[in-house]
Each structure stands twice: as structure tokens, then as C-alpha cells.
Image (spheres, rainbow, N blue to C red):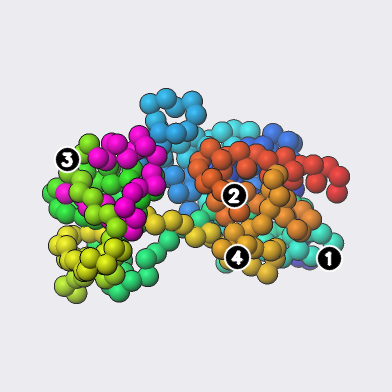
Amino acid sequence: METMPEIIDLAIVGGGPAGLTAGLYGARGAVRTVVFERAMPGGQIITTDWVENYPAFPQGVNGAELGQLFADQATAQGADIKMFVEITHIERRSDGIFVLESADESFLARAVIIATGSVPRKLHIAGEEEYTGRGVSWCATCDAAFYREKIVAVVGGGDSAIEEANYLTKFARKVYIIHRRDSLRATAVIQQRAFDNPKIEFLLSYVPTEILGNGSKVTGLKLESTKAEGERVIELDGVFEFVGVDPINEIAQGLTPLTDSGYIETSQNGTTKIPGLFSAGDVTNTTLKQVVTAAGKGASAAFAALHYLENE
């Protein structure tokens, strides 16, 4: 006779700051809590060299270290973190139980929090796909060491772009910062650090139109002025893109309403239109997408989920 799978009280899909904080609060609420993470716990922060704006770390903290601290605390409170398990489909049965499917097995849960986060947005220009992994990157922490004494460009003007540009100067001989506007969007203190860095050159009011290469690696970048000042080509060895993020929303499609931009619609406390389904972090329609806000939203979603489970 086939054994029915255990019914998890609270299943959390995604092991970034939102998911791990939700796991911490779920476990502390004395319900069986399982966090499913398709890779290593920590989410995008594990690819960040240094996090300077997370409370209680006045000198900053390494992103991978912070991610591990999130995971360790959730585990210490009793959360079960299943690494390298990617949930590919979720549906809600007529009896209110959720079925979560991975490539290898299915899981049952009374409540679910989707905290799948987001991925870096692509430029969608010529040469980008061809030279991905051969000079085109979205992770300075991962790939900076390949560009010792070389020339690279960072595309973007927000906090992530400018922070990563500063980090790249530890390795590269020169770093271009390319931004479509004539001023940056990054926080003032981060901007000033870049302005003071002699290895950084700013190319403002330009947009990339093509990544150039010799068939095996990147050799240059073609730019177009946003002020009708014509085209420009710069020679370089690598292009790092930091132009925003897109939500990882595949498992939510058809399950719960999404915004026009693809984010999961939630209330202030993380509830969705579906009873028992909650969401938190960068996959939701929140304005500020930072580690601290993801953690806070994870706590709120878990609290709402616990209330739902108590009253189910």
C-alpha cells in the first residue's frame, strides 16, 4: 500500500532573506516548517561582496556570510531547509491542501509562502546571449577575478551597479560606468565613493546597443548617446549588467494574480487572493527591495500564515 506523503504545516519556496526569515518565524510558531531552496541558502545576497546597510553590522558584512547566518538561525529554531530542491509547480486542491511538485517528488502543505525572489534583468541587445559567460556577467563577486588588469564596463546607475563597479576596481585596470541618464540613482554615499575612485570613468547619457566580440570573448561595447550626440565604441574585456531585476514568478502564474510587471500581488502582510497562499520579498509588489525589507516582509507573511493555520 502506497504511503501518503507527510503534510507540511508551512512550506516556504525560496531560501533568500524573505524565505529564511519566514522559516525562522514559522518554526518559532511551533508548526512544521520546510524551506525549499533550489541552490544555496541566502538568495542574491550570496553573490554580493559586501552588505553595508543591514542593521547590527556597522562595518558591513560579506553577503555569503550574512546568507549563512540567516540559514543557521532558521535551522536553530527548527526549520527544515531542503537545499537543491526546486519547486516547479504549485496547485491548491479542493480540500485546501497545496501540492508542491519538484522534478523528483511531490510535497503536501497546509499553507505556502512564495519567496522566490528575482533575477537580474538583461539588456536584450546584440551579442549579449552569444557572449554570456565569455565576457558578459551579472555578478561581479563571482567573476571579478577573471578581469585582473583588464578593462570592464558596468551598465546601470543604481546602488547595485555602483557598488559592484567599486568592487571591480579591486581587480580591473579600468571600470566604465554607463548610465542612460545624466545623473546616477545610487545613494549619495555610494556615488561619492565611485566619483573618488581614480579607476572609474563615467559615460553618462549613453545606452549600450551591441556587445562586440571576436567569436570567443568580448572585445568591445557599442553605445548610443541619449542626447543625440551619435554613436561611440569602447574597447574592453567584460560587461557587467545591473539594470534592475525581474521576478521569479513561474510557479505563481495561473495560481494567484500578478501585477502588470509580473510581481505577485499581496496585501501589507503578505496575503494573496488565495486562502493559505502568501508571498514575501522581491517577487512581490513592494516598492523598496532590500535585504532588510525582504526580511521584514518574510516575518509578516509567516505571522499571517500562522494565523491562517490556527484558524483553518
Q: Are marks 3 and 4 in contact (CB under 8 Å)?
A: no
Q: Is residue 78 magenta?
A: no
Q: Which of the two discs, 3 and 4, labels the residue nearer the N terminus?
A: 3
Q: Which of the two discs, 4 and 2, labels the residue nearer the N terminus?
A: 4
Mark number, residue 260: 4
Q: Position of residue 176 (x, y in %)?
A: 22, 52
The segment highlighted magenta reads 174-195
Look at 50% across and 43% down and name the residue there: 290
Q: Which of the two discs, 1 and 4, labels the residue nearer the N terminus?
A: 1
- Number of marks drawn: 4
Question: Residue 210: which quarter of the image?
Answer: bottom left
Q: Which residue is mark 3?
A: 198
Residue farthest along the front direction in this orientation: 228
Mark number, residue 94: 1
Image quarter hosting the N terminus = bottom right
SS assignment at label 4? loop
For residue 37, say whether it is visible. no
**Left or right of 262 on screen, residue 201:** left
Identity of the amino acid at label 4?
A: Asp
Q: Position of residue 170 (x, y in %)?
A: 21, 41
SS assignment at label 1? loop
Q: Which residue is mark 2?
A: 286
Identity of the amino acid at label 2?
A: Thr
